[in-house]
Amino acid sequence: MQNGIFITGTDTEIGKTVIAGGLAAWMKQRDVHVGVMKPISSGGDADARFLKHAAQVDDTLTLLNPIRLHYPLAPSVAARLENRKIDIGAIDTAFKVLREKYEFLVVEGAGGIAVPIQGDFLVAHLIAHLKLPMLIVARAGLGTLNHTLLTVAFARQANLPVAGIVLNAIPPKVTGFAEQTNPEEIQRLTGVPVLGVLPHEKRLSEPKPDLALLAGFVNQYVKWEQIF
């Protein structure tokens, strides 16, 4: 494993931030000098603030989240509405500073890997540009086979390494056949390790959750040792 990982999702509102923050908090508990980054945010800086809290770093939000867009839309669309051009160079500069400062860097993307950032430049191109392996966060329930297989196929077409998959946020008291069978089927069809399935935990939706809870909960359900 390289000294960083890019957290992406099969959809928006998939729980990428909780997984990224949980990984950072878990690494910090293991005395890893870990940093976090949200290169592009659309609709506010809540995700960057969550990651900053999870990793307990003193970096400015401007460094952690160099591109902040007002509208909660695909970055290319949000930037167009604001009459802005997204500065990939600003992402490069921030990434270089953080990569040199930390032993390991957890980077969270915006939406999925086919989301456009600027013109024909997609999140997939940003991942390739940063030269990081991917962790895919997917829904646990019905429909996730299609979304996850498409994401893995797109990643492979772009020659992006996929380190693992995490299935996230089974709603309370809902564990049907889809939730029970999806992990094995996804791993069989993709050949990518499914590292775990996280149940719903309301307390992790808070802006600044308890760090011991965050690290312990994510580590309880995700087998990080399969990729680290």
Image: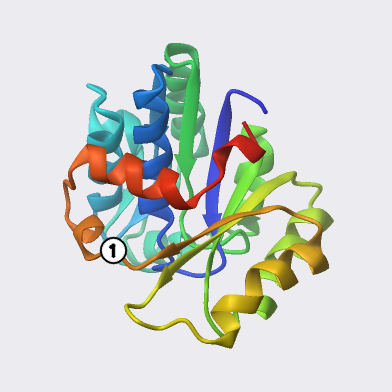
> From the image, which quarter does the C terminus lie in?
top right
> What residue is drawn where x is 52% and y is 80%?
141
| Camera-nearest residue between 84 and 204 | 204
Residue 18, how many percent across, how many down?
36, 52
> What residue is drawn where x is 61% and y is 58%?
113
Specify the amino acid type for callout 1. Answer: Glu
Q: Is residue 46 visible?
A: yes
> What residue is drawn where x is 50% and y is 23%?
104
| Camera-nearest residue between 40 and 162 | 162
Q: Is residue 72 above or below residue 24?
A: below
Kindly identify which residue carries mark 1: 201
Report the number of numbered marks: 1
| Camera-nearest residue between 123 and 212 | 212
Q: Is residue 42 above or below residue 99?
A: below
Quadrant in the rendering for residue 33: top left
Secondary-structure class at tag 1: loop
| Camera-nearest residue between 170 and 15 | 170
Residue 166, how many percent across, how many down?
55, 57
